[in-house]
Amino acid sequence: MHHSSRFPPCLQLGTFFSWWKKHRAHHTLGDVAQGLSKEPCHTGNKGLINRFWMIRAKYISTELGIRDRLFVGILTSKNTINTLGVAVNRTISHHLDNVVFFTGSRSRKVPHGMSVVTHSDKRLIWNMFQTIKYILEHYITEYDWFYLTQDDTYTQADRIKALVEHLSMDRVLYMGSPEEFIGGDMQGRYCYGGFGYLLSRSLLLRLQPYLENCRNDILSARHDEWLGRCIIDYADANCVEEFEGQKYYYYEMGKNSDPSKEDNVQFENALTVHPVSDPEQMYRLHKHFTEIELQKTYDEIEKLQAEIKNVSAVAFEGNHSALWPVGINPPFEPKTRFEVLRWDYFTEDHVYSCIDGSPKCELRGIDKLDVADVIETAMSELNKKYKPVLHLKKQQLINGYRRFDPTRGMEYTLDLQLEVVNQKEHSHSIIKRVHLVRPLSRIEIIPMPYVTEATRVQIILPVTLQDKEHVRQFLEVYTTNAFETSENAILTFLFIYDHIEAQQVNQNDIFASVKAQINAYEHRYPMVKIPWISVKSESPSQIKFMDIISKKHPVDTLFFIATVKTSINSEFLNRCRMNSINNWQVFFPIHFQYFNPDIAYHNQPLPNTVDMVKEAGLFDRSSFNEACFYNSDYMEARTHMSSDVQENEEILENLDIYEMFVKYSSLHVFRAVEPALHQKYSYQPCNPRLSEDIYRRCVQSTLDSLGSRSQLAMLLFEQEQGNST
């Protein structure tokens, strides 16, 4: 510490910060606080330190005064929120960070995925007053600009964002479509609500002390006129259409007008369009303006590509210095042979690199659509190049190659056999090789609800007679990872008896040894309680078991359905908490399954520790036994399923929880490999009473866990060699 900047022992709070500003090059705030606590001084320093830490903000953005740019509020009603309100949300919410709908009365059913604030009053003026008051109470410290509009208005979200990016945030600004007051002697202009309007943060802060006065003193029939009069009277600001060289474009739509037939500059440049009569017209407008913005993007790309070509022509290597495609990142250069990117071979019907390691599998789903799209694009570009001299008709794809380059995107090489028709109608076949790149698009940040790692996890462990022998090992691992680390989780056993086992439970309880183990662990760890539930079932069903468990827990409970072969640790439980989002997303992890050691390490000594490599195991995509979800989400999906269950009760046994969420829930079903979730190999027969689909997946999982294809092939080869000798 420099002697010249050493802090004096006794300081007043104002003097302290003045001193720190001069010497902060040598001291952080943490250093100063720590040093002050050690200085011989009167108790004033302790108060100074306490006051110093109390004024620290929770987030850096708050301390530095960093705010988000734009807040959007949509004025809606009980009658239109499920029609026009939903249409507005679908056209702008994925472009904007925060969109909130304000209504005067609550609808019987609130649309999923929309943030709705209800003021419980149908009067339009009161609804507007409460909306402004709500914004001042909850959002004024977080945003620089506030855009308000109605649900019968189409908003071009990207243009609104671009507008506020070019406006000074500290201006007192009221911007929209200016209108004269009708009747009376009121001077000034208000912004017409149908076309929406922008309010600056500075304007709302100036208006805040007088908002109650506006409610009591100003009488008006229209909510936008009432707000305009309030702003003019107390904030001394009029509605303007243009400010700092930026113009607020808007367009009045005719009744039942077709957006594709509107042909004027005002419409093409519009930020907002009003009135919109129905959701279909809203979507048509969105399609029209999206196509306009897309074409502008294409034109800009062509312009930039032309500039790059012109510049590269005068470079040292000439046009060879420009990469193909123009403007795309250069190809990935491997540093070692292990980093070389692999080309996958495909035809129109098959691909020759499969997930399960098979040499050939059918091309289906999104992969088939991808190949068809690439071939169609190649034909379109070839015809553009050779018309009208030649006309190309596709006959077949001879060879196809593709690879994913992490720096560029998906690369394709196609060998196409084409029928060429010249101007004299003579035709012959040629083979053309084309190269295509599907570049990586710009990464977008998708807003997600807030989650925390402090949530308690309720672990449900189903145990059958066949699972009993694995319980001891499960508890040993769980004790180390949860009991001894005071993990915020509760383990509940679910003992599953069949009809005969349930009748003999008093004389011969098949789970008596397991219950004894539970008592031993509760005695060893007095702060731990391990509850258990007994159920009777001839055909095990995840949904039937969860129906029982769900009723015994609050709606905000976070469940994790585990298996006795699962090794649970804190790393996975945290990911369970982060990936399970109430009323938004459920999480189905794919565990890493170790191979049968007798096959994976045939004629080799077993290693002390097994690494997570492809020779040791695989991520078991056929298993759906583990799941993380909230009780409220389960209850909602189960409610939607009730009508089908009444018609066919067997559906409870034919579906598992994963299929239930996929078919009967609008939530995101997130399924991903989970490196922290491991299962050791142990043979377990599949229950023949399971549904056909679940039984098939169980058998496939059992077969996959034996070993890799190469390991099984070597074992068969050795057997054949042994038989031949």
Image: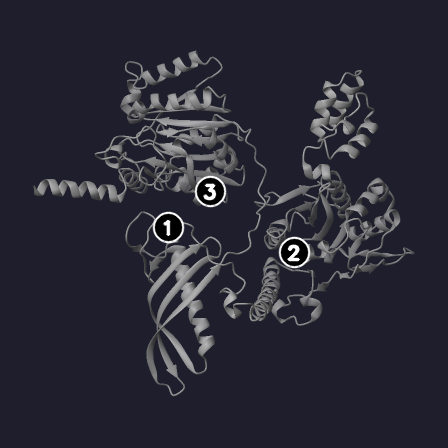
* Position of 80 relative to 384 (above/below): above
| Residue 461, placed above or below residue 104 | above
**Numbered tag placed on residue 337 in the rendering:** 1
In the displayed structure, does residue 319 sit left or right of residue 168? left
Count the marks.
3
What x and y, as percent, mark residue 640? 47, 41
Determine the image quadrant of residue 664: top left
Nearer mark to the viewer, of 3 and 1: 1
Three-letter amino acid code of the residue under disc 2: Ala
Q: CA distance from mark 3 to mark 1?
A: 34 Å
Q: Secondary structure at mark 2?
A: helix
Chain-order first, disc 3 or disc 1: 1
Q: Quadrant of the N terminus?
A: top right
Q: Residue at x 32, y 24 (%)?
A: 470
**Towards the viewer: 19 or 485:** 19
Image point (49%, 54%), residue name: 407
Q: Does 204 appear above or below 331?
A: above
* Residue at the limit of the structure toward the right, as seen here: 185
Residue 527 x %, y % = 49, 15
Q: Are marks 2 and 1 in contact (CB under 8 Å)?
A: no
User: How far apart are labels 2 and 1 at the CA level?
Assistant: 47 Å
Mark earlier in primary sequence (2, 3): 2
Q: On residue 670, which mark appears?
A: 3
Camera sees residue 215: no
| 188 relative position to 196: left or right | right
Amino acid type at mark 1: Arg
Question: Mark 2 and 3 residues: CB-CB less than 8 Å, in contact?
Answer: no
> Does dot 1 land on a helix, a strand or a loop?
helix
Within 10 Å of disc 3 (Cα), the crowding (few <14, some 14-19, many 20+) is few
Amino acid type at circle 3 is Phe
Secondary structure at badge 3 equals strand
Q: Residue 157 got which mark?
A: 2
